[in-house]
């Protein structure tokens, strides 16, 4: 697959880069001057990549340019009806419920495809992964952290809820009580603690970060593709404590209630 198959203007507006080398794709959040803050265009670009990615791609690595993975939502979304043609929170609050629900469902699709069994996905996290950045890392099958990584779920402290698919994998990774603490306190989880509680598969010094990601990507792409696909599907099925689609719907409904209250 060539990068030209994904709309270049959308990728640029979303601050997302895509490179393909053989069976590996690398998605890079590429707004380093904004700490890779995300907008609806980011989620639309991620969704487009997921829909168009060549089936020959076996591994997808998601990473951030510059000093951070992603600092979460672009703060302009909190104070504007429109951000570069995409709806801000005030605009969503003014939509009919069904329309706003459908828009958030589209945002979620930018993350949810990363857990489909067609390929293995790896979040390569350095620096801050806050809010939507943390949820993007949680959307991936595996997470490699540099030792400077800092994870934080900031939404609840802002009066919102995590609604990009992050609640279910967080509870699965750390358990209900720990997830409650992480979300409601909004505290930072440093790399070493993330490894202890199961949020990271590996933590490595910054100087070894890229090599560690490469080794893992090579290792998980080595088995036959059919075996990987079937194994991932089985593991997902075994881990499903609730219906994932229902969980996404619950996140959307909760977020719409929060947006409406904040707007009022």
Image (spheres, helix red, strand yellow):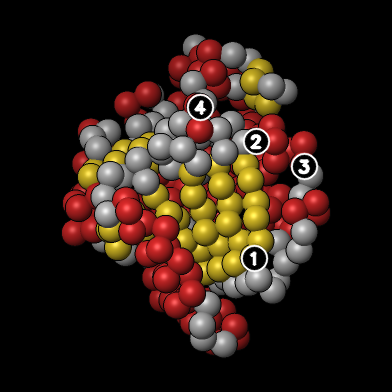
Closer to viewer: mark 3 or mark 2: 3
Instruction: Please state if 60 lies on the left or on the right of 183 as rendered.
Output: right
Q: Name the residue under label 4.
A: 33
Q: Single out the mark in the foreground, 1 or 2.
A: 1
Q: Mark 1 points at which residue?
A: 21
Position above or below: 218 against 260 = below
For label 1, the SS is strand
Which residue is under mark 2? 14
Between 20 and 123, the one nearer to me in the picture: 20
Label 4 SS = helix
- Residue found at the very far front of the displayed protein: 207
**Is label 2 in a helix, a strand or a loop?**
helix
- Residue at point 45%, 77% (across, down): 219
Question: What percent of the width, then of the height, locates residue 85?
Answer: 72, 23
Residue at mark 3 to residue at mark 4: CA–CA distance: 20 Å
Q: Residue at x 65, y 51 (%)?
A: 18
Instruction: For the residues labelled 3 and 2, say whether their Cβ atoms are less than 8 Å apart.
Output: no
Q: What element carries label 3?
A: helix
**x 31%, y 38%: residue:** 152
Which numbered disc, 3 or 1, marks the residue closer to the eye? 1
């Amino acid at each position: 697959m060539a990068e030209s198959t994904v709309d270049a203007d959308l990728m640029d507006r979303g601050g997302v880069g895509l490179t393909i080398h053989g069976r590996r794709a690398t998605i890079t959040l590429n707004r380093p001057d904004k700490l890779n803050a995300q907008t609806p265009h980011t989620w639309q670009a991620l969704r487009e990549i997921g829909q168009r990615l060549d089936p020959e791609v076996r591994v997808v690595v998601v990473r951030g340019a510059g000093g951070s993975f992603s600092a979460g939502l672009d703060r302009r979304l909190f104070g504007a009806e429109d951000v570069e043609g995409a709806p801000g929170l005030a605009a969503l609050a003014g939509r009919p419920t069904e329309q706003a629900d459908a828009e958030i469902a589209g945002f979620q699709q930018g993350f949810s495809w990363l857990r489909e069994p067609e390929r293995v996905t790896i979040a390569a996290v350095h620096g801050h992964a806050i809010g939507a950045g943390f949820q993007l890392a949680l959307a991936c099958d595996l997470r490699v952290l540099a030792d400077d990584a800092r994870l934080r779920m900031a939404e609840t402290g802002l009066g919102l809820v995590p609604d990009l698919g992050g609640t279910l994998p967080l509870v699965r990774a750390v358990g209900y009580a720990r997830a409650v603490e992480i979300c409601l306190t909004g505290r930072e989880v440093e790399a070493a603690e993330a490894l202890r509680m199961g949020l990271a598969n590996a933590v490595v010094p910054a100087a070894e970060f890229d090599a560690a990601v490469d080794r893992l990507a090579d290792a998980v792409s080595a088995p036959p593709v059919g075996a990987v696909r079937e194994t991932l599907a089985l593991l997902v099925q075994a881990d499903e404590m609730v219906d994932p689609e229902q969980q996404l719907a619950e996140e959307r409904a909760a977020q719409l209630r929060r947006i409406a209250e904040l707007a009022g």
